[in-house]
Image (cartoon, rainbow, N blue to C red):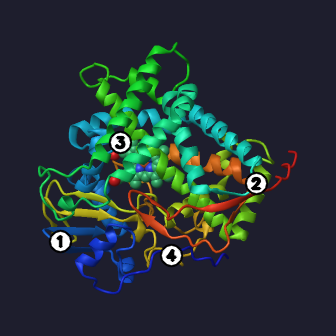
Amino acid sequence: MNEFIPPYPPRLPTEPRPWTRLRLARTNTVAIWEESAFTLDFSHERVFTRTTFLCNSPESVQFAFNLKNASFERKGPQTRHALEPLIGDSLFISDGETWRQRRQIVAPILHASRLGYFAKVMVETADELRESWAGLSGEVDVLEEMAHLAAEIICRATFGRQLGRDYTCETFQSFTDYQQAISQIDLISFLGLPDWMPRFRSANVRRAQRRIHRVLDAMIADYRSRPATEEPSVISRLLDARGPDGKPLDEVTLRNEAAMLFLAGHETTANTMAWVWFLLSQCPDVEARLHAELDQVLGGRLPTLADLRQLTYTQAVVEETLRLYPPLPILPREVLQEETFNGVRIPKGSMVFVVPWLLHRHRRLWDKPDHFIPERFLPGSKEPVSKYAFVPFSIGPRVCAGQSFALTETILCVATLAQHFRPRLRPGHVVEPVCRLTLRPDGGLPMTMEPRSPTPAPMH
Ligand code: HEM
């Protein structure tokens, strides 16, 4: 059994002062916990003006995110205020009736039943990267490579293969600028001050926001001006969609939803793939077992959607990566209506957190919680002990609408590339997980992609 413990930030001494947490939260939001936090089930504490509740047991996660979702469906103010200039009232940050209407439109577009077309886009794009790596000598930053791959895939899936390809670089650069420009912690929200108080937005944020809107408006106009295609791209479905009044979505709603999908759907998957490469580079036994499965099932050919059923170990590697490094490690919610859990009153206006970073490493829910052991996700394993103990995509009515898309994408891309390359981390490079908007390896992943030849699959 693999004994590798992947890196995590140092744990805080017991009972740190609130200001210590705030200081750390500004640079790395997964560095703010002490060891005892990994044993908590349901707890609460006062943070400045607000009481915050931590749901860290399967029962409390089920309570907040599923059974009583309506009382906890509003995203935290930090998330809403950071993203609102970019994605308006789109699915990711809306709640109430707006959220319900948008969910009804967007979720079916990304549903598993539509994955056939998306899977082709994913494999085709990953194969282009394989070709470009084939001529490579020296190092690449694998985090950056995965960011480009995921951006390319979501752009082609959203705007169709040709238009997506034409515009990816510009879209990617504008989103990167925006993410760099928004500050990690908005102090007004952190201190629990009201929503109506104006937030400071730097000129850089406003500039990046305008640029993204310009790019997306141009892409939508360009899409409309081209001859109709049969491609079931996301934008074609959004253009066909009708609101409850029977009318098509207006231009701003259309742009907001397209921006939201790009935002929700590229960095999360990119980071997951980057972590997979890092973990493989550290665990030769896992890498060998993965190669054995890929050779057995694919034998060097490109994967298809139909192969997923057989790629159980590849899927387990991806799921174990999501357990250790959930791209969205903290899921904050604002309480809309008072509730009581286990006799504890959760008042309206307080904050509730589900923290995959803690839950996925909970001392009583997982055996060797800090180890990388993909086998725990193989069929027949006793883990996870509950579906509410493993929530990288959240759970309940607000579960990630792109969950099947993302899992399919990660597995197909890893399968396409891992058949032909072994990732080797630059010797001496220290990897540290850091979370600003999403959880990623700080400073990137300088790696050499060593070529390998897949063994042809046995004849059946
Ligand atoms: C490994 C990749 C991904 C992970 C780990 C992930 C995780 C999540 C999580 C945790 C949420 C809930 C956030 C919260 O409650 O604050 C979420 C929401 C969402 N995700 Fe993903 N996501 C991934 C990829 C994608 C992709 C590829 C797409 C689109 C193609 C997507 C679309 C969405 C949407 C639309 C929502 C909002 C759903 C709603 O509020 O109803 N995600 N995702």
State the separation of the CA atoms marked 2 and 1.
Answer: 60 Å
Residue labelled with disc 1:
344
Place residue 284 in its image quadrant. bottom right
State the separation of the CA atoms marked 4 and 3.
Answer: 40 Å
State the separation of the CA atoms marked 1 and 4.
Answer: 28 Å
Determine whether label 3 and label 1 are within 8 Å by CB. no
Camera-near label (1 vs 4) is 4
Residue 129 drawn at (x, y percent): 67, 44
Report whether 281 appears left or right of 41: right
Residue labelled with disc 4:
369
Q: Is mark 2 within 8 Å of ligand 1?
A: no
Q: Let me know if residue 253 appears in the view.
A: yes
Few, some or many residues within 10 Å of mark 3 (<14, 14–19, 20+): many
Which element is circle 3 on?
A: helix
Few, some or many residues within 10 Å of mark 2 (<14, 14–19, 20+): few
The mark nearer the N terminus, 1 or 4, is 1
Residue labelled with disc 3:
208
Camera-near label (2 vs 4) is 2
Residue labelled with disc 2:
137
Residue 161 drawn at (x, y percent): 58, 28
Determine whether label 4 and label 3 are within 8 Å by CB. no
State the separation of the CA atoms marked 3 and 1.
Answer: 44 Å
The residue lying toward the viewer, choosing from 402 and 276, is 276
